[in-house]
Structure formats: structure tokens, C-alpha cells
Image (tube, rainbow, N blue to C red):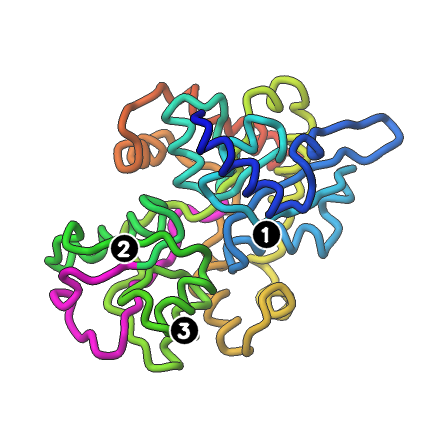
Amino acid sequence: MSTAKRALYFLGLIFCTGNLPGAGNEGWSADAPQRVRIAYASRSSSAMPLYMALQKGYFKAEGLEVEIIQMNPRLGATAVVNGDVSFATPFTSTFRGILQGFPMKLVFIHLKKGPYYVMVRPDIKDVQQLKGKKLGVATIKGTDQLVAEEMLQAKGFNPNQLQAVAIGDGPVRMQALVSGAVDAISVAPPHDLMLRKMGYPALAGPPEVGLPSAGMLTSDRLIKENPLLVKRTLKALLRSHQYILENRQDTIQTLMKWLPQPLDIAEHSYDGELKTLSRDGIMTDAEIDAIIARVGEKKRPLDEVRDFSFARQAMKELQ
């Protein structure tokens, strides 16, 4: 890692956690809960399984003391490898790190296809009007940008004619569009409906074929040194997924606590995103191969990029 990138990483980690790097390494004994830090990208519906598992005590039931930390997606892979967090949930940026050689694996998937929408200024009525305009994204070549470009391309627009600008998480991208700093953004619920209510139209979305918006990615070292922690974490999340899928009304109320919003917007978030949560946290090898082809510059053997054995064990125990 270059000096500049290293400085960016440490500054970002201190900002996001409020602690010095190194404080998140797992230490545990038979009498104490195991500490787990999970980095997520955006305070949005996609992080709800983490919040629900905390609210319902599913992590605690597995002997885990979990802290969820909002972190820039670009920092996730480095933070996981360094042991500053146990897991990172941002999918594309972290998975791309694995394809570039980071000693990590995808062990769980929350959403196989994120329901992104391309939201634009009210004066933009057609995709061809986006030529030379600015597209606000979370990070360059992240999930939201890749999905937006694919949707626009399907409508006959060349995405190379757009200027992608890294803005930040959903609420920040939304503010950037409203302020006029950018001409279009790619966002998932609830921000798409919030913008529609303000008069900002959707030019595209949701995608026919999308990319996962969130998963659980962890280090090879943690898998080797503490496999029980990995399994227990995923077991708690599977319980969270099951609860969300089977309890719409309570999930909507919990979502409104996690991300303050009107009832109709929370309902839209559930119906458009949360009801599509994976039931088993697993993807097929064909699905993983397709993602590698779309986001990676080089291919790695599947056994070096994914390990769903812990999710399978957790599901078996729950059944």
C-alpha cells in the first residue's frame, strides 16, 4: 500500500470508529463474549439485517458482542485484512479486493440483487440528456455505479459519456442531487421514493440483472483462527433474515427506528428490498463466476474467493 493510501485508510478508520486502529482485534475467553466489529457502507435498508440482529438479541444469543461501524467502502477490505474489523458488508469494492489478491473470502450474501434506481434532476426527461453530466456514486466503480451504467446502457445510452463523481452514502448522494452538485445519482430504497416525492424522476430501475449490494466478507486468518465466531455470526444473521422475511410489520417499525422515515417510505423499502433477502446466505458457483466476470480484472479460483460452508452449517443448525 502506498503512503498516501495508508494515510487515507488510517484516517478513515479513526473517523469511522472513534478508536485507534488495532482496537477491534478479537480477544475472548470462555467467560466473556467474543467481540466482533462489522463495517457497513451506508445507513440504509441494506444494513437492516445487522440492526435487526442487534435489536432482537440474536448476536448476544450466540455469545457475541457486536459493534456495527459505518465505513467508506474503499476501506473495508484493508480493515478486514488488518484485523481492525471482523467483517465488511460492502460487496463490490470488497469483493474486488479479493480478486486483486487480498486474503479474504465471501462467506455470506444478504441481497443477491440490489434494487438501484437512477434518479435525475426534474428537467432531465430522457437518458440522452445525460451526455456530459455528472453521476453521483458512493465510490468509483462500486455496485451503485456499475448497476446504473448497465441500466442506462440497456436504454441505449453510452455510460462513458457520464462523469462519475464519488459522493458517499445514500443520504449524501440524495443531498448532492437536490443541491445541484450532480445531475443524477444511483440509489436504493428508501432514497428513491423520498426523491420522487420531491419531484425527482427515476430514469431507470430497478435492474433486471443486478449485483449484490451487501454480503459478509472476512479474512482468511479469522476463518482459520476462529471458525466458530464466523459460524455464530452468520447464524445470528440467518435468524435476522428469517425474522425480517416473516414479520413485515414489525420489520417496517424497526426500519423506521434505524432510519427515520415516513411509514409509506418504510413500506416501500421493505417491499422493494428487504423482502428479497437471501434465505440461506449462499450463491451458486455460476452466480459467483458471473460477478467475477463483471467486476474483476482477473479471475481467481472459486475456492480462493468464497466459502459458504459456515452459512451451510449455520442453516443446518437452525433447521
Callouts 3 and 1 close, C-beta under 8 Å: no
Task: Report the front residue among 298 and 289.
Answer: 298
Q: What element carries label 1?
A: helix
Residue 290 appears left or right of 63:
left
Start-end of magenta stretch: 110-135
Quarter of the rendering containing residue 302: top left
Quarter of the rendering containing residue 203: bottom left
Q: Is residue 198 magenta?
A: no
Q: For the N terminus, which image quadrant?
A: top left
Residue 92 appears left or right of 19:
left
Quarter of the rendering containing residue 59: top right
In the rendered structure, find residue 148 and report the number of the disc placed on it: 2
Q: Which amino acid does label 3 sit on?
A: Leu
How far is the residue under mark 3 from the one under mark 2?
17 Å
Of pointers 3 and 2, the one earlier in the residue sequence: 2
How far is the residue under mark 1 from the one under mark 2?
24 Å
Seen in the picture, residue 218 relative to 56 is either above or below; the reply is above
The local crowd at label 1, few if under 14, some if 14 to 19, many if 20 or more residues have their Cα within 10 Å, is many
In the rendered structure, find residue 164 and report the number of the disc placed on it: none
Task: Report the front residue among 192 and 132.
Answer: 132
Of pointers 1 and 2, the one earlier in the residue sequence: 1
Q: Is mark 2 on a helix, strand or loop?
A: helix
Q: Which amino acid does label 2 sit on?
A: Ala
Residue drawn at (65%, 39%) of the image: 235
The local crowd at label 2, few if under 14, some if 14 to 19, many if 20 or more residues have their Cα within 10 Å, is many
In the rendered image, which residue does mark 1 sit on? 49
